[in-house]
Image: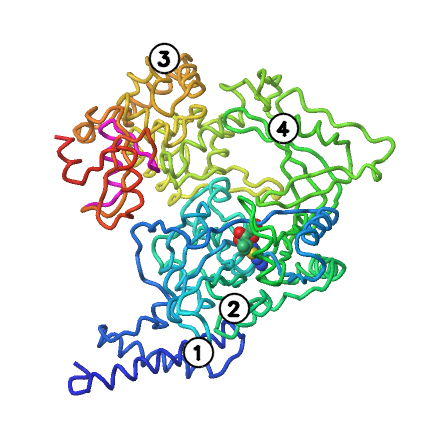
């Protein structure tokens, strides 16, 4: 014991002092962008605090900066009612509507008013409650009346003060703002995530699916993390933009922003008091061109009537305040030349047209391709060869073509006609009535579909044969060693050793398999025989049978033989299966080649039924019953949810009339219980639940 003889009061005083100092330095650094002491001095103070807190955890100050780097694992976010409903803003994209907004204001409050123009930050709204100068809660917007209590996560955001600087703030007040992620942080973390996913053997599509689409998306995913130390690793930032107090300290919004900033809140510098609409438009135009220089994303400008009494007079509609409006900028777009259209063939034969563009920079990245979705889209755009097109980046990573610059169209350019035959196997494409997508029907022989099916089969969430990648699969296929995924199980070391094949699309290279890769490939294939039935079922690649559906079907039928003879009616009656999936399953097993494929897999020893030990966990005891699991239990909520499904029950995510049981654990929000009791829904505890299973 290092501090055996010290006086606890002295230690407490020192801990409090260090807490205050470090918070002040953090505030200077993160909010004011000013550095008051060197990193070294800062670290030394932090280290001293760490040591004291470790030795005397009971003396830790609740505002400790160490709490700012998280560590709290929240089991589930508590649902909290907003004192002031979190309304949204009415939007406009054009000047005319903005002038109409101004005319409406004038009609109600006369000529004497001003506006405050602010940036519209593209993040997530947050509502902070402070009591006696300390952060009491941070709640997300939710449905506007209730949101998630994400206080532990928000405490990791350095720009949000745990404790305010001295000031004349009310004992209790609410301040609203936007949590966001800087573009550079987003790029850095998404790149890191990409590398980690690549290392884990995810393929390109899976990686694209898991990467965050934009900073807002990343910020929102971060704030909803259950473990706040995870949040602390993904730096978020925040601007505060609206103060709610019962008894007004100031008369105008402009003054309230200044006050908030004095109390320690981070308020953006980019706001302006405007005397008339021409000043408002000036502000809008200024930031339309300057937004690209900001380190974070904005999607418009918010215009608010400045005087609080006038705001009150104007009031609210059901959804939005009448005293404010958002002027939204159109998504960034550029024009470039369409070089050619290529057509990709998916594993189900679905054809996706892709526009190959002359590389152009858009919103900070180089764009070479744009998705064209289907034939109707090409028709809608009336695309011609070598057209100059406008490309826009919305919320998605892959940009889209919004329109054609018809003035730049060359007089002799030909209209683009959709292909009639598969670019891989020449088979005539089909398009079913009511379907937007063309398909190559040559399921059993189109090379791209066959490669795609094997690639899906080996995927991480399917058979997880990570020693094989897309390129090796294509190489083995082209060398004639495999035609279907069942052939993987016949591969021999001597066939693979020193096998040479080409990899790459544009930059083609030769690759040759060495002994280590061969060993890995074969052991990976062997190991896959232990993969449980539900994943083998998913790996088969039956149209519309994703992971969740495969899980459901495996639990319901328990073996491939039983599933293969299931009727359309039987299938469609399963909750959440539906007619289309049922039709696809029936069609799949109606084909002899598929039955043979399953037979082969079975002969190779793959799991095509639920194992005896798994079977012991299954029953139909809860058949047809729905459950909402909420709160903390002796085991994890996921385990309980699995138990429900394994016994034929169904999990739902909210209280409604059709709910059968609310399975209530500890620390669950009173709102849910109240709602359930009001609707006469049975509320049961963990013990009651276990008894239902016996
Ligand atoms: S004021 C009653 N100011 O935009 C107060 N909102 O589309 C209403 N937003 O939900 C909000 N920047 O999340 C306000 N400077 C700003 C804003 C802003 C971004 C968001 C906010 C709101 C959404 C409305």
Alpha carbons under labels 4 and 1: distance apart: 61 Å
Q: Quadrant of the C terminus?
A: top left
Q: Quadrant of the N terminus?
A: bottom left
First in sequence: mark 2 vs mark 3: 2
- Asked whether residue 515 is in view, the answer is yes
Q: Are marks 4 and 2 in contact (CB under 8 Å)?
A: no
Q: Residues within 10 Å of mark 1 (few under 14, many from 20)?
A: few
Q: Position of residue 160 (x, y in %)?
A: 45, 66
Instruction: Give the distance between the C-alpha atoms of the residues marked 1 and 3, in whole angstroms.
Output: 70 Å
Residue 539 at what x, y percent from top left?
A: 38, 29
**Mark positioned earlier in the residue sequence (4 or 3):** 4
Q: Is residue 19 above or below residue 210?
A: below
Describe the element under mark 1 as helix, strand or loop.
Answer: loop
| Callout 3: SS | helix
Camera-nearest label, 4 or 3: 3
Q: Which mark is residue 266?
A: 2
Where does label 1 land, which residue?
166
Give the percent coordinates (x, y) of residue 237: 49, 63
Q: Which residue is under mark 4?
A: 374
Marks 4 and 3 close (CB-CB < 8 Å): no
Q: Which label sits in the foreground, 4 or 1?
A: 1
Answer with mark 1 or mark 3, whichever residue precedes in sequence: 1
Mark 3, residue position: 569
Cβ atoms under marks 4 and 1 closer than 8 Å: no
Residue appearing at x 64%, y 57% in the figure: 303
Residue 121 seen in this snapshot: no
- At 36% from the left and 38% from the top, the residue drawn is 464
């Amino acid at each position: 014991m290092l501090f055996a003889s010290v006086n606890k009061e002295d230690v407490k005083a020192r801990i409090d002092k260090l807490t205050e100092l470090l918070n002040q330095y953090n505030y200077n650094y993160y909010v004011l962008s000013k550095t008051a002491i060197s990193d070294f001095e800062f670290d030394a103070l932090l280290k001293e605090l760490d040591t004291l807190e470790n030795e005397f955890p009971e003396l830790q100050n609740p505002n400790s900066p160490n709490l700012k780097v998280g560590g709290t694992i929240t089991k589930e976010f508590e649902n909290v009612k907003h004192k002031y409903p979190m309304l949204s803003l009415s939007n406009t994209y054009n000047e005319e509507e903005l002038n109409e907004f101004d005319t409406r204001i004038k009609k109600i409050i006369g000529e004497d008013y001003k506006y405050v123009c602010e940036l519209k930050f593209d993040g997530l709204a947050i509502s902070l409650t402070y009591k006696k100068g300390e952060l009491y809660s941070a709640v997300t917007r939710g449905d506007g009346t209730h949101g998630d209590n994400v206080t532990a996560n928000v405490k990791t955001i350095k720009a949000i003060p745990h404790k305010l600087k001295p000031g004349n703030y009310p004992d209790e007040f609410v301040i609203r703002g936007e949590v966001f992620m800087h573009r550079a942080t987003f790029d850095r973390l998404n790149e890191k995530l990409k590398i980690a996913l690549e290392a884990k053997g995810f393929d390109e599509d899976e990686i694209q699916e898991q990467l965050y689409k934009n900073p807002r998306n990343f910020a929102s995913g971060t704030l909803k993390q259950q473990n706040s130390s995870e949040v602390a690793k993904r730096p978020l930032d925040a601007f505060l933009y609206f103060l709610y107090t019962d008894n007004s300290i100031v008369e105008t919004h402009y003054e309230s922003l200044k006050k908030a900033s004095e109390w320690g809140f981070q308020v953006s510098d980019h706001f302006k008091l405007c005397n008339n609409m021409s000043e408002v438009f000036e502000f809008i135009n200024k930031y339309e061109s300057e937004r690209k220089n900001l380190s974070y994303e904005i999607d418009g400008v918010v215009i608010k009537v400045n005087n609080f009494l006038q705001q009150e007079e104007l009031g609210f509609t059901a959804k939005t305040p009448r005293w404010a409006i958002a002027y939204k900028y159109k998504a960034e777009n550029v024009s470039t030349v369409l070089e050619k259209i290529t057509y990709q063939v998916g594993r189900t034969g679905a054809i996706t047209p892709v526009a190959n563009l002359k590389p152009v920079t858009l919103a900070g990245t180089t764009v070479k391709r744009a998705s064209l979705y289907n034939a109707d889209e090409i028709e809608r755009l009336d695309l011609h060869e070598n057209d100059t097109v406008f490309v826009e980046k919305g919320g998605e990573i892959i940009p889209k073509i919004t329109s054609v610059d018809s003035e730049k169209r060359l007089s002799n350019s030909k209209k683009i006609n959709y292909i009639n035959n598969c670019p891989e196997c020449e088979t005539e494409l089909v398009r079913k009535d009511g379907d937007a997508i063309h398909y190559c029907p040559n399921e059993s022989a189109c090379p791209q579909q066959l490669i795609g099916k094997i690639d899906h089969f080996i995927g991480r969430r399917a058979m997880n044969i990570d020693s094989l990648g897309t390129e090796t699969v294509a190489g083995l296929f082209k060398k004639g060693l495999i035609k279907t995924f069942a052939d993987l199980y016949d591969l021999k070391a001597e066939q693979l050793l020193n096998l040479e094949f080409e990899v790459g699309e544009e930059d083609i290279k030769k690759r040759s398999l060495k002994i280590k890769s061969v060993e890995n490939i074969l052991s990976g294939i062997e190991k896959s025989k232990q993969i449980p039935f539900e994943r083998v079922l998913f790996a088969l690649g039956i149209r519309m049978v994703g992971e969740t559906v495969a899980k459901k079907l495996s639990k319901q039928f328990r073996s491939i033989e039983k599933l293969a003879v299931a009727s359309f009616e039987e299938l469609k009656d399963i909750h959440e299966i539906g007619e289309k999936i049922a039709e696809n399953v029936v069609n799949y097993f109606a084909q002899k080649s598929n039955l043979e494929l399953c037979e082969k897999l079975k002969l190779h020893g793959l799991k095509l039924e639920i194992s005896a030990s798994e079977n012991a966990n299954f029953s139909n005891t809860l058949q047809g019953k729905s459950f909402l699991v909420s709160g903390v239990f002796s085991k994890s909520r996921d385990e309980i949810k699995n138990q429900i499904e394994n016994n034929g029950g169904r999990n739902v995510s909210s209280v409604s009339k059709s709910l059968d049981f609310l399975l209530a654990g500890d620390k669950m929000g009173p709102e849910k219980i109240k709602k359930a009791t009001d609707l006469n829904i049975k509320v049961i505890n963990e013990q009651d639940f276990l008894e239902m299973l016996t």
